[in-house]
Image (spheres, grey):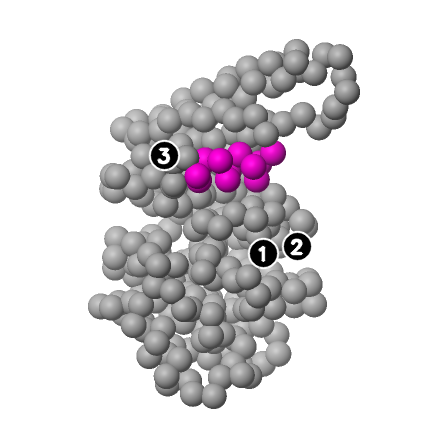
Amino acid sequence: MKRILLLTDFSDTARNAAMYALKMFENEKVYFDLLNAYDLEFSGSPYIMQVKEELALESQKGLKSELSLLKRRFPNVRIELASRFGTLIDVIHNEINEFKPELIVMGCRGETALENFLLGSNAYAVVKSVKAPIVVVPKHAKYKKPDKIVFATDLKNIKSGKAMVPLCDIIRQFNSTLLFVNVMDDDITNRLDAESQIASHFERVDLSFNFVEGDDVSDGILKFMDENDADLLTLLRHEEGFFERLFHPSITKQMVLHPDHPMLILHE
């Protein structure tokens, strides 16, 4: 059974992301963990244990309230509650080590996923620090079946088929069309070989390779997604390479994607 980790801080944004995931996988056998991490922002207080206990009670109370709201919409879904003390990143790492979720889902408060990244958000901190597949859902995003998925790439960063498993699962589930968009092709010497290698990871998938011209990467992705009525943007997180170049401040400060475009972040 697939295991999906839903992150919540009890905000409308987090609730919307959870609803998105529950709707997306409502016809799949999925075990959901609804996780809230709480931490102390100060130290040295003589009442620190009392404060910690109060935070734990508030976390548990908030989780039960969220569960009630989610069950109202999805009464048959299987959701376990997880209240954990510690920083968000540490808690997520511990959950991954212990339960090995196939996917992490979180919301972002910016008008868009990419705008949220620019604000130094929790979403970007998680994406940079956690090496697990992550779906980032903008706070105004409404679920739409991912008939078309755009994968922004430089044709050099897809080396492992294992990293593509979450994307392949979604494609098979919804019979999605996969649209690769090459936005940085300056160093590619043999495009056909690169395309063939990438395609080998997606057998029996309806896919195409496309190229965006111009210096404005963000504008190119935005226009391509709009023109093709795409529903989900996929990016591959790499130690050094395309992801970092794409999200370099000189590029991303002008990047604004529509708020109904969630992002799937994969890790090589």
Q: CA distance from mark 3 to mark 2?
A: 29 Å
Query: If you read the primary sequence from the N terminus, does the residue marked by circle 1 or circle 3 appear first?
Result: 3
Look at the numbered disc 1 and give the secondary structure of its residue.
helix
Q: Which residue was labeled with disc 2?
A: 118
Q: Which residues are magenta?
A: 87-97
Identify the residue at image location x=29%, y=72%.
200
Give the SS element for disc 3.
strand
In the picture, the quarter occupied by the N terminus is: top left
Label placed on residue 176: none
Queried whether the magenta region covers residue 118, the answer comes back as: no
Residue 9 in which image quadrant? top right
Residue 32 — which label? 3
Cβ atoms at labels 2 and 1 below 8 Å apart: yes
The image position of residue 75, as x and y in percent, is: 30, 27
Say which residue appears at 54% left-offset and 50% top-offset: 127
Q: Report the mark closest to the observer, 3 or 2.
A: 3
The residues tagged by marks 1 and 3 sit, at their Cα atoms, a distance apart of: 26 Å
**Residue 90 belongs to the span the image colors magenta:** yes
